[in-house]
Amino acid sequence: MLHRVGTFLLCLLVASGALHELRAQATGTDQHTVTIRVRQINVLSVGNEVTVAMKEAQAGEDANTQTASSTVSVTTNSTSPQKISAALDADYSDGMVLRAKLDAPDSGASIGFQTLSAQETDLVTGVTATAASNLRLTYEASVSPQVEPNSYPRRVTYTILEE
């Protein structure tokens, strides 16, 4: 009988050690937190350089008006309304007017043709969470007969910002 008790205790001791080893293996895990941080995105890019070539005026015409186009691509993840505005690096002299119209992405509204100047001018409003490419950008230039023949470049800066 003593032999059976010893065998029983030995079996119990071996089983206890195996159980402890199983527990040690089962608790050999760890964990950590992964955070995805999303930053505000408000970016746009403008297509190629544009030249508005004025045609020869007809006798008796006061202003010569021509158009040219390019594209704009925009991405924003903002849920608050954003606007796209434009400004010239310097105003044109008397007799020259440059207007621009930018088609809106699905989440915004185009204001239509607006006269550009050195002051920011809104072209599109109400833009939220969108990624749109190749939005049509149309320029319309008007020149009076008093403007001397020459090239008159201006840099146009486009900005997307909160309304």
Image: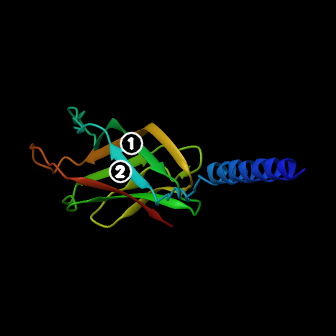
**Residue 8, can we see it?**
yes
Residue 122 falls in which quadrant of the image? bottom left
Does 80 sit above or below residue 47? Answer: below
Residue at (59, 43) in percent of width and height: 106
Residue at (53, 56) in percent of width and height: 34
Out of 59 and 13, give the one closest to the viewer.
13
Label 1 crowd bin: few (<14), some (14–19), many (20+), radius 10 Å: some
What residue would you read off at disc 1?
72
Contact (Cβ within 8 Å) of mark 2 with mark 1: no
Out of 80 and 77, give the one closest to the viewer.
77
Residue at (22, 55) in percent of width and height: 95
Q: Secondary structure at mark 1?
A: strand
Label 2 crowd bin: few (<14), some (14–19), many (20+), radius 10 Å: some
What residue would you read off at disc 2?
99
Number of the label disc, if any, that sits on residue 22: none
Circle 2: residue type? Arg
